Image: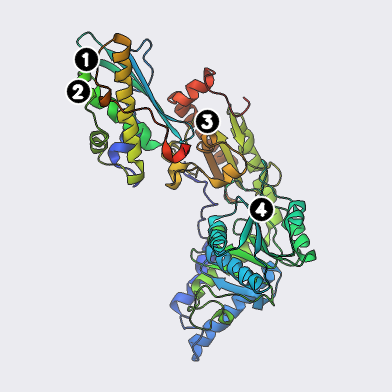
Amino acid sequence: MRIYADNAATTKMSRNAIDAMIPYMEEIYGNPSSLYEIGQKAKEALEDARARAAKVLNCEAREIYFTSGGSEADNQAIISAARIGEKKGKKHIISTAFEHHAVLHTLKKLEKEGFEIELLDVHSNGLVTAEQVAAAIREDTALVTIMYANNEIGTVQPIKEIGAVCREKKVLFHTDAVQAIGHVSVDAARDNIDMLSLSAHKFHGPKGVGILYAKKGIMLSNIIEGGAQERGKRAGTENLPGIAGMVKALEDATSDLDGYTARLTPLRDRLIAGLDEISYSELNGDREHRLPGTVNFCFEGIEGESLLLLLDDKGISASSGSACTSGSLDPSHVLLAIGRPHEVAHGSLRLSLSEDISEEEIDYLIKSVKEVVEYLRNMSPFWRDLVNGKRPHVFAE
Amino acid sequence: MALYSEKVMDHFRNPRNVGVIDNADGVGEVGNPVCGDIMKIYLKINDEQIIEDVKFETFGCGSAIASSSMATELIKGKPVSEALKLTNKAVTEALDGLPAHKIHCSVLAEEAIKKAVKDYYDQNGIAYDPKDFPEDHDCEHCMG
């Protein structure tokens, strides 16, 4: 059995998205900036895609900027807000400790420029509250940037409430919605969002293309200088095949979110219940406020990379927040942010499901993880010390 | 997986000499859970100072498990004096190489064996040159 359970990393492209791209590679390959017919046809397709994306996000077409993906959109949103803020002497930015690195590293850069970055606690359940945001906002706050859903543990933040707080206090609000779009309902107007980032390959669209939504009136700063594409805010000939594929995938992924949630949530909970049976293990992040397909566990006494390699041998593609899998020395900053000690953060596993997973496959995942955890624990001197009481357990049995 | 050589994957999937030796003549443990790897080596040594049996337990990544397995294979049946000469480089070469950021796993294997031999010498009152053995040290990058 082969199960791809790493959909938070990337997804398989849908046939619809692939089919939507092909005409813009074979027939309407003109440059949308050109005057002749296939250029103008490309321009029409581009603006059609923009209008359709705007409809999905419930915003205006002119508020949609096509980018190379989520990271670029995050960079541009944050840098733009910083530039707007500093002109008014506002150099305080609020975010959380478990944002994606596209956000955290951009904030780090601004910190070196003299911005004050305040990272809110995400608590042991992986959730930040609107009250925390309200308490942190100051006269000189330039931006609040908080992810819609966490990429590692899948917790979904109260974005609508946070957005309302920011709107009331007249502070710009950006959300990295890369993991949320196509999985939970996202609405720029309802959720009081000023700027939003998304990435096509997380919802069965192509890689290398994304969207920055920026509410009209927000003066964007260019990350890429050059031609006048994207209202002069993002230079470079538009990736029309990518954009066409993305917008088709976006429409498909958001067309029946209720059905998607109703189908996937019980399977996710079956997986959680099965993995909960493993002794000295714990689910990471809130049980309720989570994406329909994301499950993340820590297992005591084992290390994540060896777990992934043995699961791969059983046909399962998954990921881990272990230091060994990232090539860095520290385990996942997300798991550390929710208070997991290093030794259990090394033993983490993320399974992110796609909507076509079956009950039989869920049971195979549970069985396989149980087998591999037991096997690795049996050769682990760390586990032996835990069992013998030489080291203290972190989790309850 | 292209991350590791076939040798590494073979020793990871089918580790040699996994387990515990009760009443071992020498035991060495290195690493710590915060860093994400611990290796423990058990030695059975006969009167001729030959390593009759060796077992290991490892908490760690694929290359940590493979390095332990390979290291035990390289010293099994050898005189203690020869085991002491085992270098991390020899372990890495026997595994057809390790990715740069995993070399540290082969260092742990070398250190675990040295520590087990030192334990054997200490238990049996055998004199040795302390310079032959690495000092116990905290893992700088994790323990700060």
Have a look at marks 2 and 3 and say if they share a chain: no
Q: Going from the N terminus, do you reach mark 3 or mark 4 first? A: 4
Amino acid type assigned to the residue bearing label 4 in the image:
Tyr
- Determine contact: label 3, label 1, CB under 8 Å: no
Which residue is denoted by mark 1 in the rendering? B50
In the displayed structure, would residue A49 be above or below residue A327? Answer: below
In the displayed structure, would residue B27 be above or below residue B71? Answer: above
Have a look at marks 2 and 1 and say if they share a chain: yes
Residues B125 and A282: in front is: B125
Q: Going from the N terminus, do you reach mark 2 or mark 1 first? A: 1
Which residue is denoted by mark 3 in the rendering? A370
Number of residues whose C-alpha sits closer than 10 Å to that of mark 4, classed few (under 14), some (14–19) or many (20 or more): many
Amino acid type assigned to the residue bearing label 1 in the image:
Ile
Percent across and percent down for residue A200 are 55, 63
Number of residues whose C-alpha sits closer than 10 Å to that of mark 1, classed few (under 14), some (14–19) or many (20 or more): some
Which residue is denoted by mark 4 in the rendering? A260
Residue drawn at x 68%, y 57% as measured from the top left: A257
Residues A134 and B125: in front is: B125
Q: Using the numbered discs, state the Cα–Cα distance from disc 2 to disc 1 in whole angstroms.
A: 9 Å
Q: Using the numbered discs, state the Cα–Cα distance from disc 2 to disc 3 in whole angstroms.
A: 40 Å
Tag 2, which chain?
B
Classify mark 2: helix, strand or loop. helix
- Determine contact: label 4, label 1, CB under 8 Å: no
Q: Quadrant of the N terminus of chain B?
A: top left
